[in-house]
Amino acid sequence: MAGDWATANERAEADFDGTGKDKRMRYVTAYLAAGVTLLVLDVIWLTAMGSTYRRLLDGMLTEGFRLAPAAIFYFIYVAGIVTLAVAPAMDAGAGWQTAAIKGGVLGFVAYATYDLTNHATLKVWPWQLTVVDIAWGSVLTATAAGVAMFAVERLMGPANS
């Protein structure tokens, strides 16, 4: 077991892709690109749709904004996008389209889990919100994953060149 750890650790330390650029920098680039994309698009969406959410959820939303839980969500979700959508596309030598498709699936599953659980357990959770929010999560996550992969390819070259 200790030998396995050393071998895995040595591989991580010497893990270079075909371009000679450190694979970890690809992950950092993907994380930053996905994070910025997710944040910008979500701010636009929530600004545009805020009154609709307030109307549909009538009194369930807080008056203020809780930054800490929102920041924790974004850090975790972006890590999920990179791990489950962008990294597999990079490892396969695929393009931004593959990352976007994988991101769309991740967004669908994540947002469906949230919305359908709320729809099943809360007294007030309109089906319209469930449908719109799942669609938004799918598009948002697909876009963030696709942009992240595109940024990695554009800034650092294809993974398998």
Image (cartoon, rainbow, N blue to C red):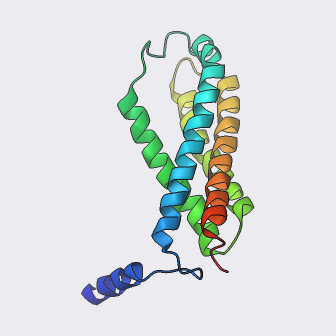
Q: Residue at x 30, y 85 (%)?
A: 6
Q: Is residue 103 left or right of residue 12?
A: right
Q: Is residue 70 visible?
A: yes
- In depth, the one of 113 and 65 nearer the eye is 65
- In depth, the one of 21 and 41 nearer the eye is 21
Q: Is residue 97 left or right of residue 37?
A: right
Q: Where residue 90 sits in the image (x, y, percent)?
A: 61, 70
Q: Is residue 36 left or right of residue 73?
A: right
Q: Where residue 12 sits in the image (x, y, percent)?
A: 40, 78
Q: Residue at x 59, y 61 (%)?
A: 86
Q: Residue at x 34, y 80 (%)?
A: 9
Q: Compared to 143, does 66 lie above or below? A: above
Q: Where residue 153 sits in the image (x, y, percent)?
A: 65, 65
- Residue placed farthest to the left in the image? 2
Q: Residue at x 48, y 15 (%)?
A: 60
Q: Where residue 23 sits in the image (x, y, percent)?
A: 50, 72
